[in-house]
Image (cartoon, rainbow, N blue to C red):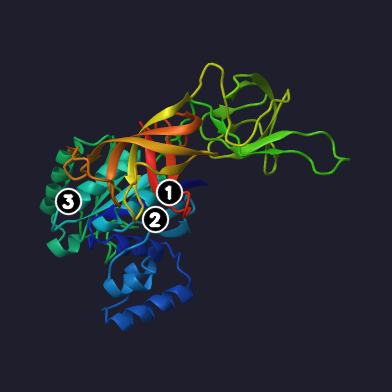
Amino acid sequence: MDLLRLITCGNVDDGKSTLLGRLLYDTKSIFEDQWDAVQRASERRGDTGTNLALLTDGLRAEREQGITIDVAYRYFATPRRKFIMADCPGHFQYTRNMVTGASSAQLALLVVDVRNGLTEQTCRHAFLATLLRIKHLIVCVNKMDLVGFEQAAFDRVREQFMAYAARLDTADIQFIPISALQGDNIVTKSAAMPWYEGAPLLYTLETVYVRNDANHVDPRFPVQTVIRPQDPAAPEFRGLAGQVASGVFRPGEEVLHLPTGLTARITAIHGPAGPVAEAFYPMSVVIELDRDLDISRGEMLARPNNQPTVGQDLDVLLCWLGTKPLEPARRYVLRHTTCETGCLIREVRYKLDITTLHRNQDGTPLTMNDLARVSLHTAVPLFFDSYKQNRQTGSILLVDELTNATVAAGMIR
């Protein structure tokens, strides 16, 4: 079965956690002890009925304040597909948490309260989702029961969003009118909205086509480790272990080693269950070559006629995650695929206002949740593609070398 990674995003109190709770409940993906705990928590809070949002809002602070703070991951499956769902917070001060959840998602559920329409935070999350190259966006127009399931209210939100979406880099946008609280158009079609001719949400999630979303054109294999037999009596073996970042690798094909530029041919590819005929993202495999090359962790295999960019100067769109502001004179540790090296931030070109999309060049330091375009210089050359071309080889993390805390996530331009 396919695996679909999705997030919920949107403004606070628009019903994101309730929507995920409804999906879990209606697909019978909740254990009895979980359901009992949620019922007891709902009674303590004085809620009328069982609060489905508590299925994802598990932190004590979240239940006390009635908001989502951290990204909550939940798992469920149907006969057609497996799902990993990330419930992202809606408050502006937790924008960095939303970026974390969206960084690996293939689809975004943008939840909109039909009474409020598009808000500043709704636009902010829609922009971030497309900036992080999430190619599928489903706008769930929620709380239709509070407007009498009127089509005019749904159409008004759709028109508002399509006007804003003209500025976004996305092609697949769908709209579904729902009531997460009552379950309308979640698993089955709602009789209260006969004017809606589309499929319910779960069927849409089961059938959305995501197999072509990964980059199968540019072969990239970051080497994680070199495997050698520990038993002296074992036959000679030297394999390169790692996860395929993009493209397809097959036995008999010629590959190029970076940074040396030397070539070799693949003699065999080993998966967890034995030899495989081809390897592609996100498979973790061991590759054997027909000649012994001096290869170590952080280096890469590519194709002679399809190579990544090699360089030490990067143009990066950076999201600052740290609680302390950026210190331009400090040295940070940069992590890219399996490579780890030191780096310096040479210039902050501008900060991006993700609400208005205006560029701010006032020179103020980067603080938590800021998005900025910066220039980086690394201690050793990296083998990278643009994030737009390849999410795996186009993304980086910055780590404070003193505290080992992740302070920024970046997308190479």
For the image, the number of numbered tags is 3
* Left or right of residue 226, residue 384 in this image: left
Say whether residue 175 is visible: no
- Front label number (1 vs 3): 3
Left or right: where does residue 342 sit relative to residue 408? right
Residue drawn at (46%, 58%) of the image: 76
- Residue type beneath disc 3: Glu
Residue at numbered disc 2: 86
Residue at image location 62% in from the left, 31% down from the top: 278
Please report the residue visible at 38 percent of the width from the left and 51 percent of the height from the top.
101
Query: Crowding at label 2, few (<14), some or many (≥20) Cα neighbours within 10 Å?
Result: many
Task: Tell me which amino acid carries mark 1.
Answer: Arg
Q: How far from the left and from the top, in percent, is residue 24? A: 40, 63
Q: Is residue 103 visible?
A: yes
The alpha-carbon separation of the residues under discs 1 and 3 comes to 25 Å
Residue lying farthest to the front in this orientation: 329
Closer-to-camera residue (374/225)? 374
Q: Residue furthest top?
A: 305
Residue under label 3, please give it: 120
Mark 1 sits on what residue?
Answer: 5
- Label 3 sits on a secondary structure element that is helix
Could you give the CA–CA distance between mark 2 and mark 1, rounded to whole angstroms?
A: 8 Å
In this view, the residue in front, 94 or 203, is 94
Q: Earlier in the sequence, mark 1 or mark 3?
A: 1
Any mark on residue 340, and which?
none
Q: Is residue 36 above or below residue 165?
A: below
Where is the C terminus found, in terms of image quarters? top left
Q: Nearer the viewer, residue 18 or 205?
A: 18
**SS assignment at label 1:** strand
Q: Are marks 2 and 1 in contact (CB under 8 Å)?
A: yes
